[in-house]
Image (cartoon, rainbow, N blue to C red):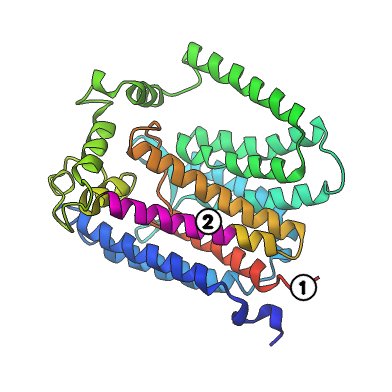
Amino acid sequence: MRRFSSFRDFDWMLLTLVFLMSIISVLEIKSATLHTKFRGFDHKQIGFLLVGLALMFLVSRIDYHWLVDIAPWAYGIGLLSLVAVKLVGTTVLGGKRWINLGGGVHFQPSEWVKLVLIVMMARYFWGLAGRDLSWVDIAKAFAMIGVPMVLVFKQPDLGTALTYLPVLVVGLFLGGIRMKQTVVLLLLFAMIGGGAWLSGKRLKGYQMARINSFINPDTDPRGTGYQILQSKIAVGAGGLWGKGTNQGTQTQGDFLPIPYTDFIFAAFCEEHGFVGGVAILLLYFLILMRLIENAQQASDVPGTFIVMGVAAVLLFQILVNIGMVVGLMPVTGIPLPLMSYGGSSILFTFLALGIVMNIRMRRFVN
């Protein structure tokens, strides 16, 4: 077996960190659902993780250059899958985001589209390497990200739509966007955002309510502000060392909303305290640093772009989810990577890590 395709070059340190985070996830999901109708979700999470691991090893054997080559086709299929959600998707809690595949299996196209966009941006900016970005280049990049963003936003799924932005930001940054262009874009976004806020017509009613509850949750503690207030209570109740596994009153008393998905970090902090929360953040830090190291060691431009795109999406999700839990960000429904329950999120993460492993295993190839 050639050295660049050998599992000797697999990033076993990264896999160990991910495996440790996955174990913590399963244990916390078990605790958070112990006295609810969702009891047993930890077993389902184990199933998702096993499938994810298998896919990660499978993808690591496929040369990522082939993925870069077929990126335009994958992008087109991704757009069609998002349109299919609009036409034949399943509506849950007011949102049409999944396609029912039968047998209780639901597929969320918006998650795998994140991976497609990462590879597509790598291919696009690779083709522009060696010259300054023009406004036309930037506009094309915005269009490639903007079209799927609009389709996902219309589902409506603001949280997932926002996770596409880090891919664009990293692409522009590594692609060599100039400071003047950056300032112009920031001013433009500020004006658009301010106009949308003042008009109130660009966001759904529940999305405006979430932002209002973030700014002042005490105005409606039993309504729109309930989630943020209960989450902050749970985090604070954990103190330094936490109340212990299965002992969190906010979590076990069913005061904390959906503690096995969006607010799993709050449930963990209540049971394991400030020390446990810092340990989780440290694990995430080590995972992200390992990803950046792999990006630096990539053998070519597409490899670097892809790994940094994966790192950017994971970092964005971590910051937004934890910021939401402690009241620093509005509630958006973005899952915490490798911690929150959910097949689509887990499979995206492990597929992305599989491509990272792929790039690492070929880092000595010129």
Q: Residue 199: x, y in percent? A: 50, 11
Q: Which image quarter holds the N terminus? A: bottom right
Which residue is under mark 2? 288
User: Could you say where residue 122 lies in the image, as x and y percent from the top left?
Assistant: 71, 52
Q: Which region of the structure is painted magenta? A: 274-291
Identity of the amino acid at label 2? Leu
Residue 112 forms part of the magenta stretch? no
Task: Relative to 45, say whether 183 is above or below.
Answer: above
> Horizontally, is 191 left or right of 285 in the view?
right
**Disc number placed over residue 21 in the picture, else none:** none
Residue 141: name its quadrant. Answer: top right
Residue 365 numbered tag: 1
Q: How far apart are marks 2 and 1 (CA)?
A: 24 Å
- Dominant secondary-structure state across the stretch colored magenta: helix
- SS for dot 1: loop
Report which quarter residue 189 is drawn in.
top right
